[in-house]
Image: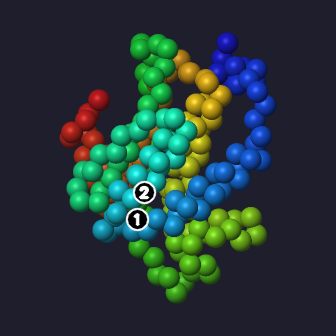
Amino acid sequence: MTLRMELMARQQIDWQAIENEAVELLSRYIQINTINPPGNELAGALFLKEILAHNGIQADVYESDTNRGNLVTRFMGDRDAIPAVLLLHHIDVVPVEEDKWLQPPFSGCVVNGEIWGRGALDCKSLGIMQLMAFVLLKRQGLFPEKHIVLAATADEEAGSTWGVGWFMRHMPD
């Protein structure tokens, strides 16, 4: 049975409730100022870890430099021979010119069905989508065949030295 068929056979999912939860989480994630430089991605990584822990998912946060946080969590699949799937997003955002924004850039406010804030498109929304996929797998009791790794990294906006680059140097597997 495929994961899709298994999901369909499980209890019905209230997609409106999931959307509302994701919107609320994205709004909160945007409110964490992770402008790079200096980054402060540790606060974002700890936020994600807290959500995962609340849903019974263990995650590790690695501080690659002062306040430069990276998060990794895994669903271990049934079969080791199949390559893992990596879900990757970055926590940091580029600087803002606040006077050019219609809404405060770290408000995470919802206006006319749109979430406003630095990182809403690049790349915090992707991070919440990935996190919600993990949460739904856990809530539904689904265990995919492949290993799935979720990584939220620091420093993408300035070369990835403290994010993906740090992982490649310190944890290449």
Residue at 45% x, 23% y: name it.
76
Q: Quadrant of residue 171?
A: top left
Query: What residue would you read off at disc 2?
Result: 44
Residue 6: x and y in percent read 69, 19
Task: Locate the N terminus by quadrant.
Answer: top right
Residue at 58% x, 31% y: name it.
138
Residue 172: x and y in percent read 26, 33
Q: Are marks 2 and 1 in contact (CB under 8 Å)?
A: yes
Q: Amino acid at mark 2?
A: Gly
Residue 165: x and y in percent read 27, 47
In the visual, does 47 lie left or right of 23?
left
Residue at 53% x, 74% y: name it.
105
Mark-to-mark CA distance, 2 and 1 = 7 Å
Residue 167: x and y in percent read 27, 41
Query: What residue would you read off at disc 1?
Result: 34
Is residue 84 visible from the viewing direction of this image? Answer: yes
Within 10 Å of the Cα at label 2, are there few (<14), some (14-19), or many (20+) other Cα atoms? many
Q: Which structural element holds mark 2?
A: helix
Of callouts 2 and 1, the N-terminal one: 1
Above or below residue 108? Residue 96 is below
Above or below residue 152? Residue 119 is below
Q: Quadrant of residue 136?
A: top right
Residue at 47% x, 48% y: name it.
50
Q: Amino acid at mark 1?
A: Thr
Q: How is the image coloured?
A: rainbow
Above or below residue 21? Residue 40 is below
Task: Locate the C terminus by quadrant.
Answer: top left
